[in-house]
Image (cartoon, helix red, strand yellow):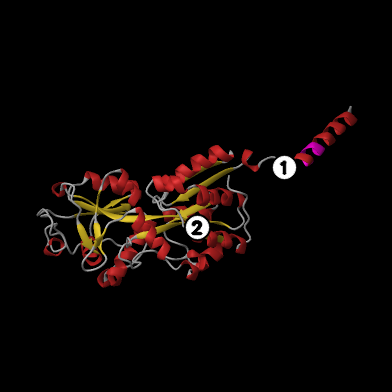
Amino acid sequence: MDSIFRRIAATLVAVLAATGPAPAALAQSLRGAGSTFVQPVLEQWAKTWSLQSGVDVAYDGVGSGAGIERLKAGSVDFAATDAPLKDEELAAGGFMQFPIVAGGIVPVTNIPQARGKRVRLDGETLAQVFAGKITRWNDARIKALNHAFALPDEPIVVVHRGDSSGITYNFTAYLSKTSDGWRETLGTGKTVKWPVGLAAEGNTGLGQLVTATPNSIGYVEYGYALQHEMQIVGLYTSANRAISPTQTTIRNAVESAQWGTARNFNLLLVGIPGDDTWPIAATTWVVLPKGRRASLDFLRWALLRGDHAADALGYTPIPPALVGMIEASWKTNGAATGSAP
């Protein structure tokens, strides 16, 4: 009897050897965490990839800082962050990083008397508002930038993130680049010591608080602002022209950036010059341990096949030239991927 079982076992081994290993998708799941900026499109990508590949992908939008902490703790397969990691941090963790999608960070207001009109500000004035140095909507410095309509004599309610946020990192980087006073006193960071305002958790939480608070101002991801019909602020990038965020003005920032000079793709898009360039464009980076084939298969598919979903949600897909640089970086890091179905 034992010999019969041995012959059956040998036959099964031979069959398995001939057909190759069982698809990894049947036994795999992927977990990611981090940026709330990119949460809507990552969740859509995860849903589609799960259906196509059989790999169960889940993403938890907990903020960029918390996502990186989960990655370091080994509780997720990849993290998404709107603030890139420095070379030494990548080396210490054995990580690689690359941009996965781009978008815009937009100041938003809730001014009942605006009646559909767009408030316009410049970087210095915006910094003065978030620093608590401009406190009313009819301040002379705001009025000078908004000749088209009268702003109310009401106090400005500042709303900011209370968690560790890559969106905050990019927003404060813009304020630091356009305002000497902000750079010298508050600076750039995932968290800063906000002198005024109400704190909210996550991109959605901040957007909801602005929507619920008359005469408030905050900052959110562009796609979220569009989907929730928020009052988006226009920004002066020169003395004579205010720029509005659109897919085109955000894409112009991505394509104008000098990616070839950026080690580990560590490059912010804030303040890139151009007459038709949104000044607070941003990319989200994916960070993961080197050599993670399953994660890379999903992320490569997102780069090559996820552009329509990204565009529909108000994000800007990574341009083909930059995708080529990213794929080359995988080879440098000893990573390999399969084909993107």
| Overall secondary structure of the magenta section | helix
Image quarter of residue 195: bottom left
Going by the numbered disc 2, the residue's amino acid type is: Pro
Label 1 neighbour load within 10 Å: few <14, some 14-19, many 20+: few
Badge 2: how crowded within 10 Å, few (<14), some, or many (20+)?
A: few
Q: Disc 2 designates what residue?
A: 320
Q: Is residue 327 magenta?
A: no
> Which residue: 15% across, 46% down?
115
Residue bearing mark 1: 21
Measured from the top left, where is residue 167 in percent x and y?
A: 36, 56
Which of the two discs, 2 and 1, labels the residue nearer the N terminus?
A: 1
In the image, 15: left or right of 282? right
The local secondary structure at tag 1 comes to loop
Residues in magenta?
13-17
Q: What residue is rendered at 19% in x and 55% in y?
A: 119
The structure residue drawn at horizontal position 45% and vertical position 43%, both measured from the top left corner, is: 43
Residue 242: give x, y in percent of width and height: 24, 61
